[in-house]
Amino acid sequence: MSDGFVLVDKPPGPTSHDVVDVVRQAYGTRRAGHAGTLDPFASGLLIVLVGRATRLSQYLVGLPKRYTGAMTLGVETDTEDPTGDVTRTDDGWRTLADSAVRSAMASLTGRSLQHPPAHSARKQDGERAYRRARRGDPVELEPREIDVMRFEMTAREGSTVEFAAEVSSGTYLRALARDLGRALGCGAHLAGLRRTHVGSFSVAEAVAVETLRRQAPALRAPREAVGHLTTITLDTERRGMIVHGQPVPAADVAGGPVALVAGGELVAIAQRQGEVLKPKVVLEG
């Protein structure tokens, strides 16, 4: 079985898990998982790790993400997206100038605390919030700090606002649409969403699901998945130490995770502890 990852362009409709199942079939393995989910109605870039590379997921889920999408002003839904039931309508959007929408969107940029949607996978008392919400039980999720680097209107036609956004990991675009609607006073929901980038990876590099079903491309090397990390090349002796779980001298490396490579291939991910680098994830051996 090969180890590595594939970039997939998920269409609207299937779940992220559905896409992972296609990858499993394409590469003949049960060992596969995505590094950051997309809602079923959304499309775009999904990173799917295969084989031992699944151990690298924790180093990818935190990467910033870029999106394009559309919001509908004047309509709120219980899920804050197009899959939910309408809970409120308001024609106040008709008198809103484009400048007012842009200003409200700008006010939502920067660091802030965001309340996750009630219909989300966050847990409350050990249970997924969306399950509680579907039963009509109260959902009270703790707000999370997010960073919105960009949230700009790219076009508008009536109540439909098209946008581009760049956000930190864990940011809900549905919640951004909800908060925009509240700031404007007329309500809003996320009508469509496409993820275009995860870190330096672009959907332009991704393969369609139907292509995967016909002929799977070669997996990309695990080292590429963690190209954003500091990289250290190991000599033969230290490679052997790392493969056997032993620490190596840290040199001038800072405190974050470090990719350790030898012969051009990823050997492990290590973390500095005192004066040594201690392996946390070992791909060889």
Image (cartoon, rainbow, N blue to C red):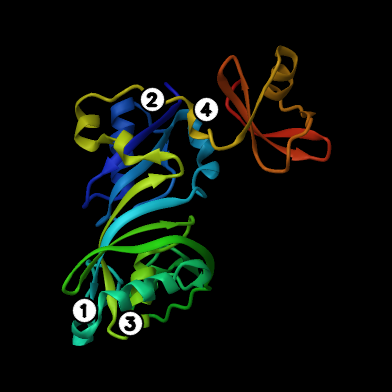
* Cβ atoms under marks 4 and 1 closer than 8 Å: no
**Residue 102 image position (x, y, % from top left):** 34, 71
Q: Where is residue 5 drawn, in percent x and y?
A: 41, 31
Label 1 with label 2: CB-CB less than 8 Å: no
Three-letter amino acid code at the position of disc 1: Val
Q: What residue sits 41% from the left and 39% below the top?
A: 201
Q: In this view, does 167 lie to the left or right of 204?
A: right
Observer-side mark, 3 or 1, equals 3
Picture disc at residue 86? 1
Judge the density around disc 4: few (<14), some (14-19), many (≥20) Cα neighbours within 10 Å.
many
Determine which quarter of the picture holds residue 275.
top right
Q: Classify mark 4: helix, strand or loop.
A: helix
Q: Which of marks 2 and 3 is in front?
A: 3
Q: Residues within 10 Å of mark 1 (few under 14, many from 20)?
A: some
Q: Residue at x 30, y 55 (%)?
A: 68
Q: How far apart are marks 4 and 2 (CA)?
A: 11 Å
**Disc 3 or 4, which lies upstream in sequence?**
3
| Dot 4 amino acid type | Arg
Residue visible at 19% across and 26% down? 214
Residue identifier under label 3: 184
In space, the residues marked 2 and 3 are separated at their CA atoms by 46 Å
- Placement of the N terminus among the 4 image quadrants: top left
Q: State the residue position of label 2.
A: 219
Q: At numbered mark 3, what does the secondary structure look like: helix, strand or loop?
A: helix
What residue is shown with label 4?
A: 223
Residue 89 seen in render: no
Tell me the mark number nearer the camera, choosing from 4 and 2: 4
- Residue 188 relative to residue 158: left or right: right
